[in-house]
Each structure stands twice: as structure tokens, then as C-alpha cells.
Image: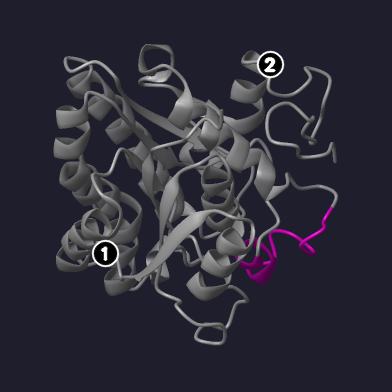
């Protein structure tokens, strides 16, 4: 039986990249997926990808999905999203906080408005959405909140610093560090209910997506240095479907958790084996 049968999931940032891969896999595993992003139609954004295309792909594969265009930097829109998802698909028992906003700007030059908006998307929205769906999970006695983090959460450590390169990643790293602390704090709080898991996962390597290619972190969508989006999707599926007491409070990396659970071979570097959902090894 598919691992997510009977489940209703919200996936933010589902128009492209990691979010789209997560939405497609959760749907393939039986979930009703509410796909969330700002880009509803192809061409609305400079990057390729849209909610229309994600939902169409899911439905073409026999899955269930609806599109929900929302700017999650707004508390009002987050709350409307939760209500619309509930009205369309029923109580929410799975939330994947994948959407993230980033600008590579040195701190000394960072516009305050952009800094605040990035925190709104990367930190405040996961809090607001988690708060909005937790009553459904508590009532059902089960649920999963999976937050998507980044290796950027780990800072450069204590000085003095020999590397004086300014990469402009301070804001992004700060928001991801906050997200990881939020994850474990919330996990401890919900442990009293049982059946609910709050976890966080980062890619083991940079994932080639339209966003990482645009920011020149990857050379192309098939850059061999990267980790395929399907790897992160598999890790999210694991964290969303595993027994809550086994994963609640986990802050981990995609390949680490997949190898730990035997979902990929321990010798695999960046590929996925054929366990479970039929992805061929890359």
C-alpha cells in the first residue's frame, strides 16, 4: 500500500525544483496534495515552473492535487491558505515547509525590507502554517511537519578568519538556523500528543533547480556535482510516513536519513536505488 494513502498534504514552494519533486512523490504515494507557490501559470515568473504544471503532472500520473497561489510572507494569506486547503481536501495531516526566499547581498548593503520579507517566508510562514494545521493533527492523533533546511544553517564558526570572501549568505543561513531550532522546539512541545512528528532535512549536496542555476550555484539542471531533487523528495516521504516516535525532532540530511533507514544503498554517493517508489539509480 502506498505510504501516504488517505493523507492530505500542503507543500509550499511546489511550482518548481525540490518542492515540485516532493509534491509529485507524496501524490504518487497516495496523498491529496495542496500545491502552494506564488507562480500559478507558466510565464508568470522569470524561472521555469508553475503550479499549473505541477498539478497537471500529478493528475496525469493518476494522483490528486490542487493549486493554491499564495504569498506566504503574509500571515493573512497563510491563514487563508490553510482554510482553503482544509475546505478542498479535508483536515491537514502533513505540512512540508519548503518555500524559501533568498537574495545574495552582503549584510552591510542588505535592504531591510528584503531582510524582513525573507524572514517572513523562511521562518515566520513555517510557524504560522504549523500553528494553523496543528489542531487537525492533534484531533486526528497523527501528523507530520517537515521543514526544509540547508547546510547554510551551519555558520563559519569562531574567528579569526583566513577566508575574507563575502558571499552574501548571512541572511539565508540565519533563517535556516532559526528553522532548525524551531523544528526541535516544536517537536518537543508536540511530543505530549503522540503520533505527530516535526522534523527538518537538508540536501546532502546542492540540488540543481531553476533557482540554484539562476544564482549560479549549479551550472545546469543536470550538473553532475549536485543531488537530484528526487533524493530530497524521498527523504521527505520517509520523514512524513515513518512512525512519529522514530523521527520526531530529527534535524538531518537527505542521504544520511535515507541510508540510515535503508532506503538507499550505503555505498550510493548521489543516486537513489529502486526501493519503494521505482526511481532508478542515478
Is residue 205 placed above or below 12 in the rendered structure?
above
Residue 224 shows in the view: yes
Is residue 123 placed above or below 57 in the rendered structure?
above
Quarter of the figure with the N terminus: top right
Q: Which mark is residue 116?
A: 1
Quarter of the figure with the C terminus: top right
Is residue 13 placed above or below 275 in the rendered structure?
below
Q: Which residues are magenta?
A: 210-223
Residue 170, given in percent of the width and then of the height, sits at 44, 52
Q: Is residue 41 left or right of residue 133?
A: right
The structure residue drawn at horizontal position 64% and vertical position 45%, both measured from the top left corner, is 163
- Figure quadrant of residue 266: top right
Residue 256, given in percent of the width and then of the height, sits at 63, 23
In the image, 246 versus 139, the foreground residue is: 139
Which comes before the other along the chain, label 1 or label 2? 1
Is residue 138 within the magenta segment?
A: no
In the image, 231 versus 113, the foreground residue is: 231
The structure residue drawn at horizontal position 60% and vertical position 51%, both measured from the top left corner, is 164
Question: Circle 1: is it few (<14), some (14-19), or many (20+) Cα within 10 Å?
Answer: some
Q: Which mark is residue 262?
A: 2
Is residue 222 within the magenta segment?
A: yes
Residue 278, given in percent of the width and then of the height, sits at 75, 37
In the image, 274 versus 224, the foreground residue is: 274
Residue 15, given in percent of the width and then of the height, sits at 52, 66
In the image, 244 versus 249, the foreground residue is: 244
The structure residue drawn at horizontal position 63% and vertical position 76%, both measured from the top left corner, is 48
The structure residue drawn at horizontal position 24% and vertical position 50%, both measured from the top left corner, is 129
Amino acid at each position: 500500500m502506498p505510504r501516504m494513502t488517505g493523507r492530505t498534504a500542503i507543500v509550499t514552494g511546489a511550482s518548481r525544483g525540490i518542492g515540485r519533486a516532493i509534491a509529485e512523490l507524496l501524490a504518487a504515494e497516495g496523498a491529496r496534495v495542496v500545491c502552494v507557490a506564488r507562480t500559478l501559470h507558466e510565464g508568470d515568473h522569470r524561472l521555469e515552473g508553475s503550479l499549473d504544471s505541477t498539478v497537471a503532472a500529478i493528475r496525469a500520473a493518476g494522483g490528486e492535487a490542487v493549486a493554491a497561489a499564495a504569498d506566504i510572507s503574509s500571515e493573512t494569506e497563510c491563514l487563508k491558505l490553510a482554510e482553503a486547503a482544509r475546505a478542498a481536501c479535508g483536515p491537514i495531516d502533513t505540512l512540508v515547509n519548503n518555500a524559501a526566499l533568498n537574495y545574495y547581498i552582503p549584510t552591510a548593503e542588505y535592504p531591510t525590507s528584503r531582510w524582513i520579507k525573507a524572514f517572513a517566508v523562511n521562518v515566520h510562514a513555517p510557524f504560522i502554517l504549523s500553528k494553523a494545521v496543528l489542531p487537525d493533527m492533534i484531533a486526528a492523533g497523527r501528523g507530520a511537519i517537515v521543514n526544509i533546511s540547508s547546510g547554510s544553517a551551519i555558520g563559519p564558526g569562531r574567528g579569526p578568519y583566513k577566508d575574507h570572501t563575502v558571499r552574501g549568505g548571512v541572511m539565508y543561513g540565519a533563517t535556516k538556523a532559526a528553522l532548525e531550532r524551531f523544528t526541535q522546539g516544536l517537536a518537543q512541545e508536540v511530543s505530549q500528543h503522540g503520533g505527530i512528528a516535526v522534523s527538518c532535512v537538508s540536501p546532502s549536496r546542492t540540488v540543481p533547480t531553476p533557482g540554484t542555476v539562476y544564482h549560479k550555484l549549479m551550472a545546469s539542471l543536470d550538473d553532475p556535482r549536485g543531488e537530484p531533487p528526487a533524493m530530497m523528495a524521498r527523504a521527505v516521504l520517509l520523514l512524513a510516513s515513518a512512525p512519529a516516535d522514530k523521527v520526531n525532532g530529527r534535524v538531518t540530511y537527505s542521504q544520511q536519513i535515507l541510508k540510515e533507514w535503508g532506503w538507499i544503498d550505503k555505498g550510493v554517493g548521489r543516486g537513489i536505488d529502486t526501493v519503494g517508489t521505482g526511481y532508478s539509480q542515478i
